């Protein structure tokens, strides 16, 4: 579905554009700065951008650079007092057209009505993303998606890192009745715990230090559409309570407000961890899990769909050839090498593998372009023996340290193998470091700790011990 992004500090023209977009049946987001616009472009690629020429944090034409490889995005610049030089510069930099304020809504509507046809042609008449694969596992997944997508059921996607959970969420949204409304993905593990509540529910101006303007959260911006909560287990537990309330009542409040707002959003959640283990560890509320787990979908790892590897590899290579105007091919022997790998990083790892081989090869990608497989990918290279009766906490710690050793200390690779976010891995390592320092203090021989007779001396020594931790 075509999506419109409006970047303007002028509320009058901004609201006029938004109403015109809604009349045309298009999804639309309005922001007031380059920073907010660049974030929106990463969250949801727009088909057309209406931007003011001058904004408080820069020129609207800078979005021509931010859009990156999305060269098909149409950019219309808006000028209060256009000059010949300004118009020529806008066209030279890549703007498609310009509008003079006050806006000519007839021209605006003409641009908007041209979007559905252009979007259909650009996508090859496809209404949803491609889920490639002919394996039994992928056929079953596609059938389940086709059954749940038209409903309003909450979906929980379960699968290892790199299996394509966001692509599945996009497919569900595209096949639903909400496909004309926004699809907004949120990585709950990538947002600071101090900011995540504001990002999800929004805040009022002056509600905390730095809140210099009202901010609409994801629930408001996704109203009528789909909200994809990736890595939902990484969400702070106290925020899970508020999320549960929204799911049950459809109501929430911005930070700093006492006014209840309503929202109509379909939730698709995802995790690469075991929910039952997270519940046992106190990281996921049981009631929230039951609310999210209405229709669970397990995304198969790549090693369970071996017959799809060659199809995916050639698809990724075709994408690179199309982007760079080349005609490189993949040899049969190279396909055989790919088929023998276990792919702990799943489809994401395969894509990166093909990209690397594409860069190294001249015309034919052969076996020498695919080997050696990096050691951190060989999950079978190290075996960890744990006696029965070991506590879960010790198992968790031993497994993380062993995986870190396997990956040569590269935390990003270790997090991918463990199926957890990089943020979670850092938190665990910090927690284990504190634990080991505490043990070192507690195991200090008693003869090395002086006998204290005064309360003041006790406090001084205690402060000295724990300041080193």
Image (cartoon, helix red, strand yellow):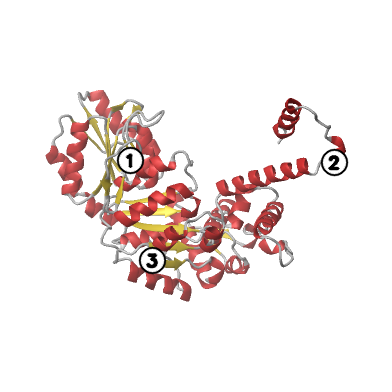
Residue 287 image position (x, y, % from top left): 43, 60
**Marks 1/2: CA–CA distance:** 54 Å
Could you tell me if the residues under marks 1 and 2 are in contact, i.e. CB atoms within 8 Å?
A: no
Q: Which residue is mark 2?
A: 445
Q: Residue at x 72, y 67 (%)?
A: 388
Q: Residue furthest right?
A: 447
Q: Residues within 10 Å of mark 2 (few under 14, many from 20)?
A: few
- Nearer to me, 113 or 368: 113
Q: Quadrant of the N terminus?
A: bottom left
Element carrying mark 3: loop
Q: Quadrant of the C terminus?
A: top right
| Mark before the other along the chain sequence, 1 or 3 | 1
Element carrying mark 2: loop
Residue 127 image position (x, y, % from top left): 30, 61
Residue 124 image position (x, y, % from top left): 31, 60
Q: Residues within 10 Å of mark 3 (few under 14, many from 20)?
A: few
Q: Which residue is mark 3?
A: 294
Q: Residues within 10 Å of mark 1 (few under 14, many from 20)?
A: many
Mark linked to residue 435: none
**Marks 2/3: CA–CA distance:** 55 Å
Q: Is residue 82 left or right of residue 354?
A: left
- Total numbered labels: 3
Q: Residue furthest bottom?
A: 136
Mark 2 or mark 3, whichever is nearer to me: 2
Q: Which residue is mark 1?
A: 254
Q: Is residue 224 above or below residue 256?
A: below
Q: Residue furthest left?
A: 106
| Mark before the other along the chain sequence, 2 or 3 | 3
| Mark before the other along the chain sequence, 1 or 2 | 1
Element carrying mark 1: loop
């Amino acid at each position: 579905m075509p999506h419109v992004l409006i970047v303007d500090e002028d509320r009058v023209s901004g609201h006029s554009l938004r109403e015109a977009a809604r009349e045309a049946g298009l999804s639309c987001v309005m922001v007031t700065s380059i920073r907010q616009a660049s974030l929106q472009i990463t969250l949801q690629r727009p088909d057309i951008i209406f931007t003011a020429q001058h904004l408080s944090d820069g020129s609207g034409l800078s979005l021509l650079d931010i859009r990156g490889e999305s060269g098909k995005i149409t950019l219309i610049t808006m000028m209060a007092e256009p000059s010949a030089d300004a118009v020529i510069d806008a066209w030279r930099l890549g703007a498609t057209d310009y509008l003079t304020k006050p806006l000519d809504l007839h021209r605006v509507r003409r641009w908007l009505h041209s979007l559905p046809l252009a979007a259909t042609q650009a996508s090859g008449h496809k209404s949803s993303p491609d889920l490639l694969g002919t394996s039994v596992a992928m056929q079953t997944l596609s059938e389940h998606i086709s059954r749940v997508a038209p409903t309003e059921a909450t979906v929980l996607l379960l699968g290892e890192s790199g299996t394509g959970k966001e692509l599945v969420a996009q497919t569900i949204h595209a096949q639903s009745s909400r496909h004309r409304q926004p699809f907004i993905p949120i990585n709950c593990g990538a947002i600071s715990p101090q900011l995540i509540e504001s990002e999800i529910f929004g805040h009022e101006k002056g509600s905390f230090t730095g809140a210099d303007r009202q901010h609409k959260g994801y629930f408001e911006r996704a109203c009528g559409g789909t909200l994809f909560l990736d890595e939902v287990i990484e969400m702070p537990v106290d925020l899970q309570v508020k999320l549960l309330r929204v799911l049950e009542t459809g109501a929430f409040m911005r930070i700093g407000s006492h006014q209840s707002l309503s929202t109509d959003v379909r939730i698709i959640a995802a995790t690469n961890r075991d929910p039952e283990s997270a519940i046992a560890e106190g990281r996921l509320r049981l009631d929230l899990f039951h609310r999210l787990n209405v229709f669970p979908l397990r995304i198969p790892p790549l090693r369970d769909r071996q017959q799809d590897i060659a199809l995916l590899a050639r698809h990724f290579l075709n994408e690179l050839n199309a982007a760079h105007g080349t005609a490189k091919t993949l040899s049969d022997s190279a396909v055989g090498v790919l088929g023998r790998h276990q792919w702990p990083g799943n489809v994401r790892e395969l894509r990166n593998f093909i990209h690397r081989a594409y860069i190294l090869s001249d015309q034919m990608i052969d076996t020498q372009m695919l080997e050696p497989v990096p050691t951190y990918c060989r999950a079978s290279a190290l075996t960890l023996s744990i006696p029965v009766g070991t506590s879960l906490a010790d198992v968790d710690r031993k497994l993380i340290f062993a995986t870190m050793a396997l990956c040569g200390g590269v935390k990003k690779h270790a997090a991918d193998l463990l199926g957890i976010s990089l943020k979670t891995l850092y938190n665990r390592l910090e927690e284990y470091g504190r634990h080991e320092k505490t043990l070192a203090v507690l195991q200090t021989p008693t003869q090395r700790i002086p006998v204290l007779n005064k309360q003041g001396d006790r406090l001084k020594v205690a402060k000295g011990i724990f300041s080193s931790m």
